[in-house]
Image: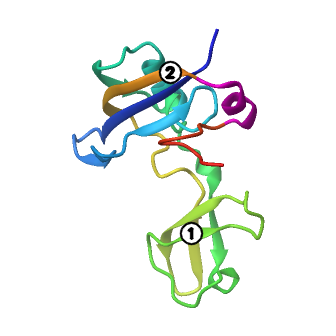
């Protein structure tokens, strides 16, 4: 089966109905199916949609950013952080490698800081309003490179 390049608009809401994120009407999100650029549950829903179709998509955590994992929460001495001032909500890369996880500060005491390496949306149900604006077959070059080329994608 031919892989597709899909462009879509979205509005993401949390369980309370609050808007968490949205695409801009001028710039739809464009991705190559199977590239890992968007969460699996949303990619599966978009795959079955036609151009111009709008749909409400609700995703359980396992189809989105996964379950919240308490093992990803760790308390460290403030002295190991790369800055002197730290507050709840700050984010840091946990190591020097560009693949090191991003951690979020969730608690600060005088000597310790509690860090959470879970994705901020882990363990949460997500609610999307989506509209597919374009679909086309991916080129051999896009499949080989693992990303979209041209408008909405990567330019070489």
Q: Residues within 10 Å of mark 2 (few under 14, many from 20)?
A: few
Q: Quadrant of the N terminus?
A: top right
Question: Disc 1 on helix, strand or loop?
Answer: strand
Residues at discs 2 and 1 in contact (Cβ within 8 Å): no
Residue behind mark 2: 136
Residue behind mark 1: 114
Dominant secondary-structure state across the stretch colored magenta: helix
Left or right of 39, for residue 24 = left
| Range covered by the magenta-colored residues | 138-146
Chain-order first, disc 2 or disc 1:
1
Residue 71 x/y as whole percent: 65, 50
Q: Nearer the viewer, mark 2 or mark 1?
A: 2
Q: Residue at x 64, y 25 (%)?
A: 139
Q: Residue at x 23, y 46 (%)?
A: 18
Residue 77 x/y as whole percent: 66, 80
Q: Residue at x 48, y 71 (%)?
A: 107
């Amino acid at each position: 089966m031919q892989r597709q390049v899909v462009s879509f608009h979205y509005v993401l809401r949390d369980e309370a109905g609050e808007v968490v994120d949205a695409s801009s009407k001028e710039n739809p999100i464009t991705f190559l199916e199977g590239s890992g650029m968007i969460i699996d549950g949303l990619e599966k829903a978009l795959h079955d949609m036609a151009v111009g179709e709008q749909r409400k998509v609700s995703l359980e955590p396992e189809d989105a950013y996964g379950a919240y994992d308490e093992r990803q929460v760790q308390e460290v001495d403030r002295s190991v952080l790369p800055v002197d001032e730290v507050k709840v909500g700050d984010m840091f890369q946990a190591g020097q490698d560009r693949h090191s996880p991003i951690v979020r500060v969730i608690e600060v005491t005088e000597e310790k800081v509690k860090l959470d390496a879970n994705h901020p949306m882990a363990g949460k149900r997500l609610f999307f309003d989506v509209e597919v604006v374009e679909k086309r077959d991916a080129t051999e070059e896009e499949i080989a490179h693992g990303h979209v080329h041209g408008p909405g994608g990567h330019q070489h």
